[in-house]
Image: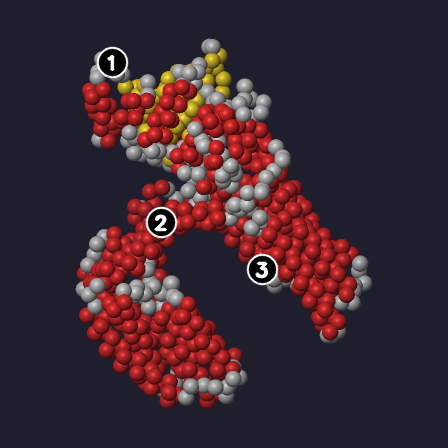
Amino acid sequence: MIKTLRLSFALKNTYRVNSILYSIKQIPLLKRIIPEGVYHIRGFKLFANVLSVIWEILTVFLGKLLYFLLMIVGAASLYSLPAESQGQVFLHLLLVLTLIGAVMNTYMFNPTKDKYYAMILLGMNAREYALTNYFYAIGKVLVGFLLCSFLFGKGAGLTWWQCLLIPFFVAGAKLMVAAAELRDYEKNGNVGNENKLNKLIWWIIAVFLAVAYGLPALGILLPVKVSVTAMCFFVAGGLISVKKVIAFRDYRAMYQELLAGSMMQMDPSAQAKLQREASNKLISADTDIASSKKGFEYLNELFIKRHQKILWKSTKKITYVSMAVIAAVLLGFVLMPELKEGVNGVLLLYLPYFVFVMYMINRGTGFTRALFVNCDHSLLTYPFYKQPKFILKLFKIRLREIIKVNLLPASVIGAGLSLLLYASGGTDNPWNYIVLFVSIAALSVFFSVHYLTIYYLLQPYNAGTEIKSGTYQLIMWLTYMVCYMMIRIKMSTVVFGIMTIVFCLLYSVIACALVYKFAPRTFKIRT
Amino acid sequence: MKFCIEHLIKSYEKKQVLKDIDYAFEDGKIYGLLGRNGAGKTTLFNCLNGDIRYDSGKIYLEEEQQTRNVLPEDIGYVLSTPTVPEFMTGREFLKFFLDIHEDSIVEPKTIDEYFEYMGIETEDRDRLLKNYSHGMKNKMQMLVNIISKPNVLLLDEPLTSLDVVVAEEMKQLLRNLKEGRVIIVSTHIMDLALDLCDEIVLLSHGELERVDKEELDNREFKEKIIAALREDGND
């Protein structure tokens, strides 16, 4: 038992340490400094080991602290309930949420890598491994919840024995679910998988969520007595279930089945293959599609037409939705004139918010992904395709196309915003109308240029269509963060709009210059 | 014509994969490139094809005592897993390819003649390439590599996943193609190398080394090659 625990720790630690080192190696600048042999350099290993141990300890408390803080105490504070009901709402939320958690977070039925490595790949004794690690996980639950229930429960006015009951109740509920699923496996051969719950369970979860958060809003709370009785019931049930969990013999067979499905997910090339198939499905099978153009224009036209689903069709949908929203607001002005003032203020101050909106509706990432997987992935293996003049020619054509695709909803949104500004009472500075329209269009052009440029300059995919560039992922993440931060900025529309227009123009010019200079060298399949 | 590699070196961090590649390939011959797993065959091909940069060395063509740099269009590279643009039909891909090479293809044939030549059936010509079988994709890839008539044709593990009939067709095709160009075939399969290739070149210790057949019969020749390869694994 102890040996199994020690071994599974060592195993988990090894791959955790290696993943930490691997991730460090993916960071663009560090990549160059850190040597290839990082995996067996003592200093690095020690450092990663320390991180790994800290992580193990954090997992005991961190998740639970957040859970109590956000989902129970935080949520409870949103209801305007008298102080003496704090304990009651605490128990109400905890009871119902725990039942959901018992199904969604079983540990036993979570197909994870460590289980796969240990039981399938390394052939450790499955029953021993499963039980040891399961009870270790339950132990973590007890310790983590004990701390949290005293920390938060006392504050909510629970008695000490109620606080003490909580961890055993949570563990008991988990054990009961596990035992029930094991029985189901024995009887019907169904293998539970907490990541693939069936529809019925999802409905039940939805109902439970409504019970948890909906009832208190209506002023209905489970009486403390009911909660406590239910908790005691689960503690007793949990104790009985321990017997089933230990007596169960078929862990090896059950895990074989459970993990078989997730082995695919662990193999990045298998996953890339799945994604490739998904991308292939985007190709329209419409036999009427044809092109009368020639050369690269021919290639491009066929590509655009056969990828309607992610390009024009989706951009048209966005356009219609935008029109509908604008029309709805206009209608709102007629029905509720007091709306006007608010909207007018928003339009003159919250243009930065639309950076995020434009980010969200841009088709750039989907376009470049499809470009690679369905087109460049194969054509880049042909020498003619890599000739600088052709790379640049196609870049120009593609840039033109993606700008067109993105500009349609952008112009509708831009014009719509100007219209709303006018209809909501207008402005003293007529520049606002122009700036609104032009800056939204400029943003759309910016995103089009941005995605295509980084695609050409970094070409992040390898032959297996996996993303192999840390820099690319970093830029994607930064793009998101910057756009997201814009939500918080409040600035005069004229000022921000002009800044945006200038920035987008400059960026586009510089980006294209960079592509012309570097793409012939950088635009190739990663090895 | 000769396809020459001089003192080509390529390392990944500290590991030198290609130590000193020095070889002159002559036209009209099919070369079988043999090497153990990890010997650097793919790295070498990627260097020759310009997919990765090498650290030092020279690659050039020698025609009538004149040397010149290798241009992308000099090289055809047929990968082991055939890659074709999935969103096009066979006919569209071929039309696109012919459009691009309009000026450089001497005496182009019609699209259907090319299909005929490769044995691609009429009903398959207007299907999307994503629905082609492995063997058919391979034929398409081969076809476009043949049309542009590159001076050097690199084939990475060809024929390994083709059915016996297609594999035999391909072999014959390669034999017909070798006139006037260098064909280099990397493979694991000794019998294929002996059957198809005019010369056997070993990639071991990061260097290229020709194995002379001399007077040996096939069995003795095989043993010689294996002995040479085995030596590579012992260091």
Distance CA(mark 3)–CA(mark 2): 35 Å
Q: Is residue B58 above or below residue A37?
A: above
Q: Which mark is residue B169?
A: none
Q: Nearer the viewer, mark 1 or mark 3?
A: 1
Distance CA(mark 1)–CA(mark 3): 74 Å
Q: Nearer the viewer, residue A442 or B173?
A: B173
Q: Nearer the viewer, mark 3 or mark 2?
A: 2
Under tag 1, what secondary structure? loop
The quarter holding residue B7 reads: top left
* Residue topped by disc 2: A267
User: Could you tell whether A30 is left or right of A47 in the image?
Assistant: right
Indicate the amino acid at tag 1.
Glu
User: Could you tell whether B83 is left or right of A51 in the image?
Assistant: right
Q: Which mark is residue A485?
A: 3
| Residue B95, percent from left and from top | 55, 31
Residue at x 80% of width, y 60% of height: A429
Quadrant holding the C terminus of chain A:
top left
